[in-house]
Image: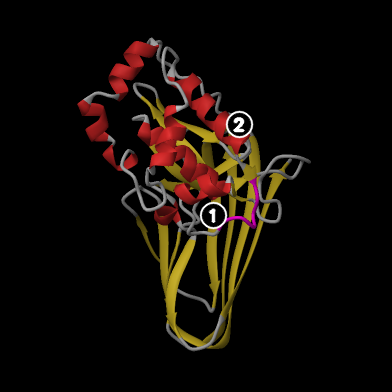
Amino acid sequence: MKKLEITHITRYSYTGTAQDSVNEVRLTPLTDNRQACYHHSITTEPASAFFTYSDFFHNRVHAFTVNKLHRELTIKMVSTVVTNDNDNIPSGVASPLEENAMRLSDDFQNQHAEYLLPTSYTGLTPELKAYSDAISDQDITLCELLRTIYTTIHRDFTYDPSATSVQTTVGEMLQFKRGVCQDYSHFMIAICRDKGIPARYVSGYHFVGDLQGGSTEFTQASHAWVECLIPGTGWFGYDPTNNCEVNWRYIKLGHGRDYNDIVPVKGVYRGAGQQDLEVIVDVKLIE
């Protein structure tokens, strides 16, 4: 069990004045069987009143509006979260044949359709289908198949923050052979869905303060990974960017079908001129 403190500051600066800024913030760490959020606060400058609700995917959303004229908008989140290791060992003892029968059944596929259908990010191109078909799912358990998927992706792609943008699709990533955690996660999701495995995009943080290697964005501890559903057992986390299963270092904010469902901060405003965005994220291990 580890205690982690997260500070996430988002600052918009405008060359002109802005007003009627309407925003949604998804920055509340989840409490589930692997982590518990003990303290959480969100403040803004200019100060704003929040309207809080849970979205379709049960992510906590803070919505607010800044009506008065302003040249800068700052959103600050501070949280304390206790995390546990997730050993990623399913409790079931089903054989590969039984697992395949369960995951490919009409009832299971219909129940989890939102995590099986393609999205604008995870559309299945012929090239992607060929890549997926090359990963065999015969005579192995789903745990073994998922491990093969994320290790294959990690082997075949290069982490490169300059290669892609926030709009990059999995088809484009396959052409570039490069990307960041968002791209790696979307790519694994697309492969899993093609094989009938419900998969969802997870937004959160990755503590790397005591590590020298890995492929997390070191200037920002913000990170993305994948959760997959194993029938009869539950959801398990996998990080194709860092070639590992999720453990105590991962702090989950929320999940959705892809990045669009779990954008940490998004909004619109009225005003002329340009805007500059600054994001500062810090994750500390509290002894």
Q: Which residue is located at x 54 percent, y 43 percent? A: 184
Q: In front: 46, or 261?
A: 261
Q: Quadrant of the N terminus?
A: top right
* Numbered circle sitting on residue 163: none
SS at badge 1: strand
Query: Residue 163 colored magenta?
Result: yes
Mark 1 nearby-residue class (10 Å; few <14, some 14–19, many ≥20): some
State whether the magenta stretch is mostly helix, strand or loop: loop
The reply to whether residue 67 is in sight is yes
Location of residue 66 by image quarter: bottom left
- The amino acid on which the numbered mark 1 sits, given as a three-letter code, is His
Which x, y percent locates residue 265?
A: 49, 63
Q: In front: 256, or 249?
A: 256
Q: Which residue is located at x 55 percent, y 28 percent? A: 86
Which x, y percent locates residue 283?
A: 67, 50
Q: Nearer the viewer, mark 2 or mark 1?
A: 2
142 vs 171: above or below: above
Which x, y percent locates residue 11?
A: 60, 72
Magenta highlight range: 159-164
The reply to whether residue 190 is in sight is no
Q: Which residue is located at x 70 percent, y 40 percent? A: 214
- The amino acid on which the numbered mark 2 sits, given as a three-letter code, is Cys
* Numbered circle sitting on residue 244: 2
SS at badge 2: strand
46 vs 35: above or below: below
Q: Which residue is mark 1?
A: 40
Marks 2 and 1, the one that precedes in the sequence:
1
